[in-house]
Image: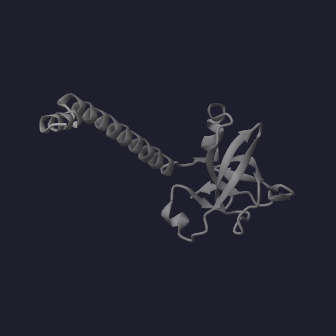
Amino acid sequence: MTLADEEFSEWKTVEGPGRSRAKLIRSLVVLAVIFVALGFVLFKGATNSLEYFLTVQQANAARAKLGTQSFRMEGVVVPGSVDPTPAGVDFTIRFNHSEDRVTEIGNPPQLFQPSIPVVIQGHFQGNVFVSSLIEVKHSSNYVAEHPTRIAKPGGTQG
């Protein structure tokens, strides 16, 4: 092999301008896909963290639209309505004179009791709201921070 042959063989391994352009386009497409995926994940995270809840009154008004989809509902546990069951607890929740019967599947939190504000997560099944999660507001500042929400025992606004 002569010196000219060696130089020629090296030239064959050097990429031409067409290949580097194709690599650049491919890299840009990969970066665009990564940015779109990252944007989607951030958007879903932000919208999930902004998920709010409906009051019992709002949920009852939108019951047909809600169907069996899962959502969060706020109200006060009605005194005298709590009935422990083998699967969890049944109770009634109230907000502004609207009520719904709730069946909780699982153990309620330790602070769960009548006359306290709760947010429950679940769905309507017939005339009953089937809950898989009870969140209890245990801060003494809750009512002061949310004056337009539940302010009196029994689920009425202040």
In this picture, residue 113 sits left or right of residue 75: right
Residue 3 sits in which quadrant? top left
Task: State the residue in front, 104 or 21.
Answer: 21
In this picture, residue 105 sits left or right of residue 74: right
Task: State the residue in front, 66 or 92.
Answer: 66
| Residue drawn where x is 80% and y is 59% of the image | 82
| Residue drawn where x is 12% and y is 35% of the image | 4
Residue lying furthest top: 18
Q: Assign the N terminus to one quadrant of the image.
A: top left
Residue 133, image x, y percentages: 68, 55
Residue 62, image x, y percentages: 62, 35
Total numbered labels placed on residues in the image: 0
Task: State the residue in front, 66 or 99.
Answer: 66
Residue lying furthest front: 1
Residue 116, image x, y percentages: 67, 63
In this picture, residue 73 sits left or right of residue 11: right
Residue 36, image x, y percentages: 38, 39
Residue 25 sits in which quadrant? top left
| Residue drawn where x is 19% and y is 31% of the image | 16
Residue lying furthest bottom: 140
Q: Assign the C terminus to one quadrant of the image.
A: bottom right
| Residue drawn where x is 30% and y is 38% of the image | 27
> What's the image's color scheme?
one colour
In this picture, residue 12 sits left or right of residue 112: left
Establish if 18 lies above or below 72: above
Residue lying furthest left: 4
Task: State the residue in front, 158 or 100.
Answer: 100
